[in-house]
Amino acid sequence: MKVFNEKILRVKLKNLSHSTEKLDINVAKKFIGARGLGAKYLYDEIDPKVDALSPENKLIIVNGPATGSNMPTGGRFMVVTKSPLTDGIAYANSGGYWGPAFKGAGYDMLILEDKADKPVYIYLGDNDVVEIKDAAFLWGKTATETTVELQKIHGEKAKVLCIGPGGEKLSRMGAMMNDYDRTAGRGGVGAVMGSKNVKAIVANGTSAFEYPDAEKAKEIAKAKVKFLREQPATGKGLPSMGTAMLVNLVNNNGLFPVRNWQSSFYDKAEDISGETLRDKYLVKRSACYRCPVACGRVVKNAAGENIGGPEFETVWVFGANMDNNDLQVINDANELCNEYGLDTISTGAAIACAMELYEKGYIKDEEIAADGLSLKWGDKKAIVEWVRKTALREGFGDKLAEGSWRLANSYGVPEYSMSVKKQDLPAYDARGMQGQGLNYATCTRGGCHIKGNMNPTEVLAPPEIRLDRFSTEGRAVHVKNTVNLATIVDSLGFCIFIRAVGIPGFIEMTNALYGEEVYTPESIVEASERILTLEKLFNTKAGLTKADDTLPPRLLNEPIPDGPSKGHVNKLHEMLPEYYELRGWDAEGVPKAETLKALGL
Amino acid sequence: MKLEVRLFSYLRDGRGKEVYLDVKEDAIVADVIKMLEIEDNEVANVLINNFNADSSSTLKEGDSVSLFPLLAGG
Ligand code: SF4
């Protein structure tokens, strides 16, 4: 394998056939890879208006040039499809070890088309082995059960990407799980896989990465690892506390939403902090492929078995957002989401939304009586049980499985869903972080922080370089640059947590893998703008409009009632027109003809 | 004057979660950082009574100072 194998595998599930075709390397370079390349193929191959859960949708799994290389965190793959949650484009990436094993089998991209008549799994081995096999014996099984079963058949070195019951039952929050507990989580990508009757994809390729100049690649990789080890965040903070180290800082800035965003300072945050997670629950750390950071946590479940631990957003959504200060409950809810294959953010947000709908009297006791569970804030037993019922669509869980927006909308009050484009927001209250609000509102995959996270510049940075988080002035430029960086990292196949290497660092690594100067800072930024604009175009053709580039009314109209960010709302209207203009989109957020031309679209 | 200092992330290692200090009048946050033997560049975020501050901020009796290293992730 190398940057690109220049080979695409296409599986037609209806007749269980497969074929390969050549990937044009110039197209790959133009769209960088992974997220960008996936967007290009999705845009070209499906009508953006198709029902996301119909056979007409396609599921694209695609690597970047760095995937499988020796560069730090170069192991990520991307899933691109039409989202059943947002009805726009979905792209969700994951680490672990699956991506390199997929590239090692000789492909860059897998395109799944149509729908199999009955459950199947796909096996990809060395020497062009592609097998589409019966998966009836796996249907209904959890991520761990599926992985164990498939490794019994294909050997322990085989890497398994699968769905759990969440995806099988078409929960719009269904995730894809790989290497037991790594997740391509957002946008309901697992439901699309379930809708195609594909339970798992086993990758077992072992070919080694061919470097044009192995010595040089090694030297650059070593220098970058050293750099990351020397940075306080990637060398000390993330390894020691995991991402949950953010709990106390975000909370102490009054940005940590409580009870479905009714306030934003949690007086029990210390109980669920990264510090407490480390001191009371951490068994050991875990890392994805070639990652010197190892932000992953291993903790114990209630039965005392080792399980993957929660990250920051999960801690928040099953913690403060439902007024639960018991980390064991969060660990258990996280485990169930992983095993059943559900996105933790959206699943937790749907339960929190239901708790508020219950508090406000929209959901009545009679409706949940048969479930035998309460929807009271912080009910520890109920929280974990609701996750299970959501995954299995049991009782009221059937409504939760549709996600918070469709749940709240069924009572005529969609405003209680704290989502953008029907996808739930993560753990930062954008009323006290103006740029984060613009990022949330405009993210092409719906409510999300990570694809343009303003937390590093609006909150985490030292005071001398930190942006005033309450100000909107010039914020659109910062958001644009941050979004561009995330688009580049996503498309190359790296992890966003090493963003500190900066665009020059990412280019240095990538060019070394190509063995030529494929990218300059200007050309890679232009490629990121091309990708973003193409995603926006997909959404526009899917029927999303400017009215979807907004925030929940609570963030625009209800000031934060207490805490250090008290009194603030998000002033999106002061930033959005400038953002559109900077991107070359018109006042309605539609890419202008001249922009498309300039970007070669 | 008396102060409470709350330490976060790895700044707790070897120092504990909360430290109570008696400092001179007009002390600034940098004095507190020095007293706790924390390297200057190790502190990225300072909050006084949960409001954003920096190492040059002046302290007053009874203040609660929170010190964070440079964090990332999420
Ligand atoms: S920083 Fe964390 S999520 Fe990123 S590659 Fe490393 S272990 Fe995986």
Image: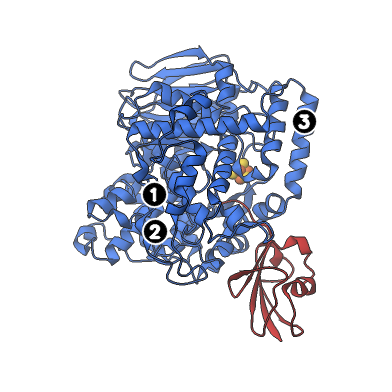
Chain colours: A blue, B red
At label 2, which amino acid type do we have? Leu
Marks 2 and 3: same chain?
A: yes
Quarter of the rendering occupied by the N terminus of chain A: top right
* A361 to the left or right of A497: left
Q: Earlier in the sequence, mark 3 or mark 1?
A: 3
Circle 3 is placed at which residue position?
A218
In the depicted structure, whether residue A279 falls above or below residue A50? below
Percent of width and height locating residue A286: 62, 46
**Above or below — where is A263 with respect to A302?**
below
Front residue of A361 and A170: A361
| Residue type (three-letter) at the residue carrying disc 3 | Lys
Dot 2 or dot 3, earlier in sequence:
3
Q: Position of residue A301 (x, y in %)?
A: 50, 55
Residue A70 visible somewhere in the drawing: no
Q: Are marks 2 and 1 in contact (CB under 8 Å)?
A: yes
Label 1 lies in ligand 1 vicinity (Cβ under 8 Å)? no
Residue A388's tag is none
Say whether residue A543 is left or right of residue A31: left
Ligand 1 image position (quadrant)? top right
